[in-house]
Amino acid sequence: GFSRTDYHKRPIRKELRRQGNLLRNAARQLVSRKGRSKAGEYPGRQTGLLRRSIGTVVLRGGLAVLVEPRRKVLQTKRSYRDAAYPFILAAGTEHVDPRDDYVSEALKRRSDVATSALRATLESALVPR
């Protein structure tokens, strides 16, 4: 039959937060180039608001991390219209061509390192029975 596997959640949560922050920094790096961007490029930086809005959210239970532009940061700085800016850049509109997805590209670049770090943390967090 099946046996139950126990593990310590604290080191796994800690490593997930760490990898989420590293991914956030990599995504911010991709949108840090000054100037306007063209279609198919990563968004350029004019005010830095998009870059500052990219954040991490640890989901309830602590076993998942989201890296995304936080709407709250965008709303409090300017207007509600600016809160839709990351989504307009990703999808494009009639007047704005879509830009490259900087978060998924950052994940693609870091996936091997993050996977190996999380695998090592999980192996060390297992409790033998």
Image: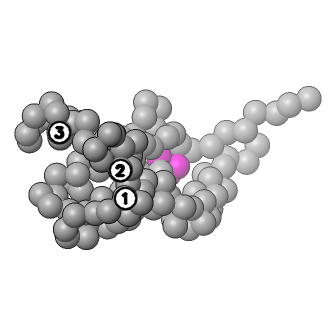
Residue 104 at what x, y percent from top left? 48, 54
Badge count: 3
The foreground one among 61 and 50 is 50
Which stretch is magenta? 10-14
Quarter of the rendering occupied by the N terminus: top right
Residue 93 at what x, y percent from top left? 33, 40
Instruction: Identify the residue position indicated by label 2 in the image.
Output: 97
The foreground one among 70 and 118 is 70
Residue type at numbered disc 1: Ala
Quarter assignment of residue 45: bottom left
The secondary element bearing badge 1 is classed as loop
The secondary element bearing badge 3 is classed as helix
Quarter of the rendering occupied by the C terminus: top right
Q: For mark 1, does the 10 Å Cα neighbourhood hold few (<14), some (14 to 19), or many (20 or more) residues? A: few
Q: Reading the chain from its start, which is encountered first: label 1 or label 2?
A: 1
Instruction: Identify the residue position indicated by label 3 in the image.
Output: 82
Residue type at numbered disc 3: Asp
Q: Is residue 129 visible?
A: yes
Tell which residue pokes out farthest to the right in this image. Answer: 1
Q: Reading the chain from its start, which is encountered first: label 3 or label 1?
A: 1
The residue drawn where x is 60% and y is 60% is 115
Instruction: Identify the residue position indicated by label 1 in the image.
Output: 39
